[in-house]
Structures are given as C-alpha cells and as structure tokens.
Amino acid sequence: MSKRPKTRLFVIVALILGPFLGVWVAFQMGWLVIFKMAPIDAMRPTIKPGDLVLVETISYRFISPKQGDLLVFLSTGISYLEDRHYDELNLPYLQRVVAVPGDEIRIENTTLWVGDNPWEPIDYGIPVRPGAFLKENQTIVVPKDCFFVLADAHDISQDSREWGWVPRENIFGRILVSLN
C-alpha cells in the first residue's frame, strides 16, 4: 500500500517537470533557438524590428516547408546576395514561403499569383511589385528543392522577386512564435 502514493507523486512530478525538461533538452541540442531580429522592417507587422523569435530547427529535416511558413535561412549560395556581400554579414534572413517546388508563380497588375490563386494569406493592402528576378506577367516554375519567399512588408524589402529562389539547404528553421 505504501508504493501507491509514491507512484502517484512520481507521475505528478514527471507530468509537471517533463515538459520543462523537454524544452531544456531542445535548447541544448539546438532544436530550439531564440533570435533577436535585426533592426529591419521586412516582416512588419508580423514581426517587428528587435523582436525575439523562437525558431525550431528540426522539423525541416523530415518535412518540407509549406506555403505560409515563416523561414529563417542563410544567404550562402544565393548569388544576388553574395554579389552584394550580404552573405558576409552572416545574418539570418526571415521571409514567408509563397511557393514550393513545382508551383507556377507570376505577378499581374500588382497581384502575385501562385498557380490560379492570388497570394492573399495576409492582406495588408500592399501591392506586389515585380523585381529583377520575377518580372511583370512572367510565369516561372519553382524548381526542385527551392522555395519562393516574400517579405510581409514587401513594399520596402527585397525577397525572391529580386534575388530568386531559396535553396532548401539554406533553410535554418521555422519561426514558431514571436516572443514580444
């Protein structure tokens, strides 16, 4: 009879401490990382300059990013960014996935189209303008293992419209939540 209360106490303690231990291990293994975002407005109003964001780094080892995910990626191998020496700063970039491998994309009359659907998951009323990579009325297909990304504040920032695809191997993780 004396074992039953000890077993209950053990279960209660495990249920309380287990999640905390799991989060601690995730941080120690590098599966969860906290970034302080650079003082830029590229993702406003979703993420503001200087916000802390929680990034998980493990899921994309097993699954592919999907449309709407917020990615953290590095500029290595993106020639437009390397040519301008942005990669030397070694800063993580944060952008939203608009199109995945095999998707057709185009810009018509300030609307970004993914296949036959306008891109409107977050409507801030900002028109989408063409760039050096994706020009007005040009249809392109996202290649295998690459992603087309867009800043939420795409009126003031550069993204795949200017510099093209983000290769899968550049993806560091995905934003789970802004901590501010």
Image (tube, rainbow, N blue to C red):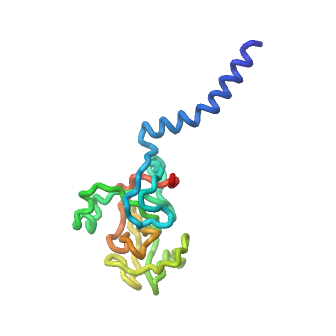
Q: Quadrant of residue 139?
A: bottom left
Q: Residue at x 39, y 52 (%)?
A: 172
Q: Position of residue 6 (x, y in %)?
A: 69, 18
Residue 160, located in which quarter of the rendered image? bottom left
Residue farthest to the top?
Answer: 2
User: Quick check: 87 left or right of 45?
Assistant: left
Which quadrant would the N terminus be assigned to in this image?
A: top right
Question: Residue 122's spot in the image, x, y percent?
Answer: 54, 70
Question: Vertically, is 6 above or below 179?
Answer: above
Q: Residue at x 47, y 53 (%)?
A: 53
Vertically, is 79 above or below 109? above
> Residue placed farthest to the right in the image?
1
Q: Name the foreground residue: 95 vs 103.
A: 95
Q: Quadrant of residue 81?
A: bottom left
Counting every numbered tag in the picture gives: 0
Q: Is residue 166 above or below residue 20?
A: below
Q: Residue at image x 47%, y 58%?
A: 65
Q: Position of residue 116 (x, y in %)?
A: 53, 79
Residue 145: x and y in percent read 39, 60
**Residue at left offset 35%, top offset 56%:** 92
